[in-house]
Image (spheres, rainbow, N blue to C red):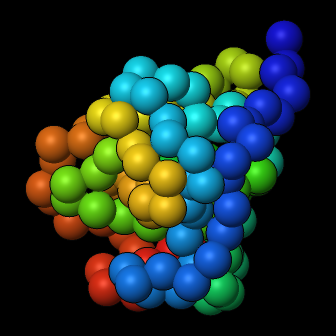
């Protein structure tokens, strides 16, 4: 069953000190809250090399139970910037074709919402897009 996009109403996108644009909140978000459930555009893995030659390279996620596809996360999903000290995390739903974002801590108004693109909030490994450029 496909879910429809849901997000808290206080989200907004603006310039980020981390690079490019980022997702911020104008109201506090309590720890554990769902920030957004974003629909996903699943792209066949055979198209990945083509995407790697475009700006989409820095915005897609590796997707699928066996990492054989890529996905563009709609809504604000591909605009959240990376941090090794994130205040949010994401969880894919491969069957429902959505990506859910949750608050790992209380997030105050005016704060940028960040996730660790390693998939694990505590992960310190490298990832596929260029560090320091942000994603937004």
Q: Is any atom of residue 42 visible in this view? A: no
Which quadrant, please, contains the N terminus?
top right
Q: For this view, does 74 lie left or right of residue 32?
A: right
In this rendered view, identify the residue nearer to me: 56 or 47.
56
Q: Nearer the viewer, residue 93 or 88?
A: 88
| Residue 77 versus residue 95 in the image, above or below | below
Q: Position of residue 55 (x, y in %)?
A: 65, 85
Q: What residue do we see at 49% from left, 62% from top?
A: 110
Residue 9 vs 16, above or below: the answer is: above
Residue 63 position (above or below residue 31)? below
Q: Position of residue 80 (x, y in %)?
A: 52, 60
Residue 85 found in image quarter: bottom left
Image side of residue 67 versus residue 45, left or right: left
Horizontal placement of 38 versus 132: left or right?
A: right
Q: Quadrant of residue 40?
A: top right
Question: Residue sitting at 50 percent across and 24 percent down?
Answer: 33
């Amino acid at each position: 069953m496909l879910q429809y996009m849901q997000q808290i109403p206080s989200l907004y996108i603006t310039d980020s000190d981390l690079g490019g644009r980022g997702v911020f909140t104008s109201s506090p978000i309590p720890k554990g809250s769902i920030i957004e459930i974003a629909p996903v555009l699943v792209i066949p893995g055979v198209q990945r090399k083509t995407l790697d030659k475009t700006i989409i390279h820095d915005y897609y996620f590796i997707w699928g139970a066996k990492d054989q596809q890529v996905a563009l996360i709609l809504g604000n999903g591909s605009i959240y910037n990376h941090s090794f000290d994130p205040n949010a995390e994401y969880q894919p739903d491969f069957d429902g074709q959505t990506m859910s974002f949750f608050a790992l801590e209380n997030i105050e108004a005016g704060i940028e919402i960040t996730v660790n693109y390693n998939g694990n909030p505590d992960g310190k490994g490298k990832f596929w897009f260029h560090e320091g450029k942000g994603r937004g």
